[in-house]
Image: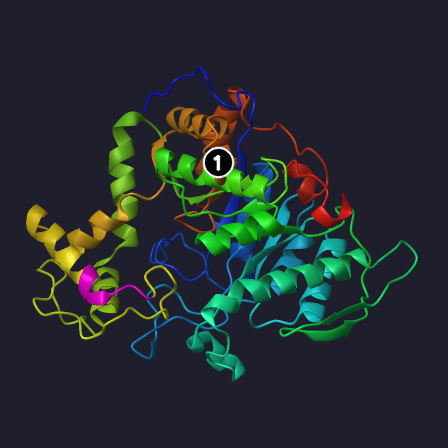
Amino acid sequence: MTHPTTDLRYPDAVVHFGVFFQGVNHSTIWSDPRSGSQLHPSTFTQLIQTAERGLFDAFFLGEGLRLREQRGKIHDLDIVGRPDALTELATLAGLTSRIGLVATQNTTYNDPADLARRLASLDVLSGGRAAWNVVTTDNAWTGANFRRGGYLDHADRYERAERFVNLAKAVWDSWDGTGFTPVTSRDRFFDVEITPTVPRSPQQHPVLFQAGDSPAGRDFATRTADVIFSRHGTHHADALEFADDIRRRTVAAGRPEGDVLILPGTQVVVADNEAEVEEKARWVLEQQVTPATALSLVGQVWGEDLSGYDPDGPLPAHDPVIEDIDGTRGAHRAGSNARDLARQWRAVAEENKFSLRELVLHHSSERGFAGTASQLADELTFWVRSGASDGFNITPYLVPSGLDDIVDQLVPALQDRGAYPSEYVGTTLREHLGLRPPLTRR
């Protein structure tokens, strides 16, 4: 795609890269012989060291407090099992020297004193490279792990999260250089008196990421976070609309317009030449959406086991047996009306004469970017300099080798355009990202 080179909002901006290791998902091609073990340390070590060689700002770990299920059974098509994010990142901190370490941690099923201490510990031990991706959960399915399923009303999840984050910040701020001041809170969510144990790191606070996309989630992020991890990483117009909304909300929250960076999650497929772009992108897609995966995804909507269906045949003729789609396979379609979605899918399949798998491939096809290194460098530079994002949190379709093409081909192409750093700016994650001091430390 050709873009104008004039009237760019940020003509000197550089592209920031992070790598997002999701863990359980079907966007990683786990069946490929080159894929590493989900649990073996070498998988994480190779991936993060490649990212650091490519001057990525951060290594971002997804987290799940419960394995995904479908119809009450463990869903094992996308690999089961994932280590604790903070434990994993503490190990990787000792094997790296510059790259940031982002841990997804839940405000619903953690306690402020404990989590603030563990995050501060990672921040100090890594020399100021820690970050916290703040997430919430209100479903009884996850809550069953903690014997408090469904106890948190949906409307309360961000209110509790904001109180949680503010308490964590107070804990991190309690160090005055010689000692600690106890942190006390009394409200309907927390009744605590916290005595901190860890001093501040060189970056003062762990960097805060947030990914909420609802109006409440966007307001929460612009009041509290340093970085937004968004899902607007495929269509430029959509991404620009989101970014402009975030900037308006940031100013409304009393902060400078560019105070919150935007790093959408995306996939990047690098081809050696133009003739291979479409072929490689199609190969990746078909490996991600196997026949079994297609049947499983449609079965999630219909609420039943469709493994006996022909993936190259039509969608089920009958309506789904469930009213709403549950969240046990993740939050992407959770709460959507199953019958409405089925009707939409049938209409698309009928119009295009799609089989069941072809329909799923169709809906999965618009995921990120594919091109030569030169084409991709132009496109990603345009996104950042036009204001649609500040960079990208890349989900590799292969682990641990999925960043190799990006680091060896795309990064040099970006550097040739003056759109990517040639070395790390400093030693802390906050410095890499060009962030201001934490809100409470300004």
Q: Which residues are magenta?
A: 335-341
The residue depicted at 52 percent of the width and 84 percent of the height is 147
> Which residue lies most toward the bottom here?
147
| Residue 87 in view in this figure | yes
Q: Nearer the viewer, residue 261 or 126?
A: 261
Q: Would residue 137 appear left or right of 77 to someone viewing this image? A: right
Q: Nearer the viewer, residue 345 or 78?
A: 345
Measured as percent of width and height from the top left, residue 221 is found at 55, 51
Q: Compared with residue 41, is residue 67 higher up or lower down, i.e. above or below?
A: below
Is the N terminus in the top left, top right, bottom left or bottom right quadrant? top left
Q: Image quadrant of residue 335?
A: bottom left
Measured as percent of width and height from the top left, residue 79 is found at 39, 65
Secondary structure under the numbered disc 1 in the rendered image: loop
The colour scheme applied to this rendered structure is rainbow
Query: Residue 259: within the magenta?
Result: no
The residue depicted at 17 percent of the width and 53 percent of the height is 359
Q: Report how many numbered discs are placed on residues in the image.
A: 1
Q: Nearer the viewer, residue 249 or 336?
A: 249
Question: Which residue is disc 1 drawn over?
Answer: 389
> Which residue lies most toward the right here?
178
